[in-house]
Amino acid sequence: MKSLVKTLTASTLAIGALAAPAMAGPDGITVHVDLWDAGANMETFTDHRIINNVPHYMDSMGVMVSSATVPAGEITFQVVNSSADIEHEMVVAALPDMSAGLPYNEDTARVDEDADGANLGEVAELEPGASGSLTIRLEPGTYALYCNIAGHYASGMWTILTVE
Ligand SMILES: [Cu+2]
């Protein structure tokens, strides 16, 4: 009987230990974001938005994150534009409906940042090689990190971030 109790306690502790890293510490957590592209002569696209469902390996530019799932709370994005020759930026948007994607203006080839939730915070317009950071508090939900330089979002320059 005693050994059974011990076993139960041990497995409960194990679950607790596994859950611990998913909780935000007092200083919040950091997500490293790499804004990348395939160079000045790369092919660009107009149909690689979230709604187009084109796999990311087809893209010639993108947003790469160190963690695609993070705990709710204060999150610091450390953003690097690793491009050799193109300006990029990172904008955080709420994405309540994946099938609807982000509000998009075909004429400007940009996400409509004035729409509700389309810009919760950003690291704007980083020159090639430049870096910046953004700290914001995010509630549980689905978010998109995207670049809103004209044409970049439609070329696949976005990624999904899940906040638990
Ligand atoms: Cu870009």
Image (spheres, rainbow, N blue to C red):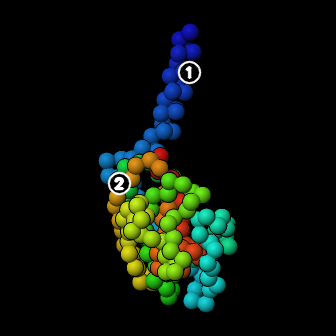
Residue at image coords 56%, 60% = 100
125 w.r.t. 143: above or below: below
Question: Which of these two is toward me, 102 or 162?
Answer: 102
Residue to which mark 2 is pinned: 137
The residue at label 1 has a CB less than 8 Å from ligand 1: no
Q: How many marks?
A: 2
Residue at image coords 39%, 68% = 114
Q: Secondary structure at mark 1?
A: helix
- Which badge, 1 or 2, is on the more N-terminal residue? 1
Kindly identify the amino acid type of the residue bearing the numbered disc 1: Thr
44 w.r.t. 26: above or below: below
34 w.r.t. 5: above or below: below
Instruction: Evaluate whether residue 75 shows in this view.
Output: yes
Residue 60 coordinates in the image, percent (x, y):
62, 78
Residue at image coords 66%, 64% = 53
Residue to which mark 1 is pinned: 7
Residue 57 coordinates in the image, percent (x, y):
67, 70
Dividing the image into 4 quarters, which one contains the N terminus?
A: top right
Kindly identify the amino acid type of the residue bearing the numbered disc 2: Arg
Q: Is mark 1 in CB contact (under 8 Å) with mark 2?
A: no
Question: Which of these two is toward me, 10 or 95?
Answer: 95
Instruction: Evaluate whether residue 147 shows in this view.
Output: no
Q: Give the Cα distance between marks 1 and 2.
A: 39 Å
The residue at label 2 has a CB less than 8 Å from ligand 1: no
Residue 24 coordinates in the image, percent (x, y):
39, 47
Query: Which one is in front in this view, the residue at disc 1 or the one at disc 2?
Result: 2
Question: Which of these two is toward me, 100 or 147?
Answer: 100
Residue 5 coordinates in the image, percent (x, y):
53, 15
Q: Secondary structure at mark 2?
A: strand
- In this view, the residue farthest toward the left is 26
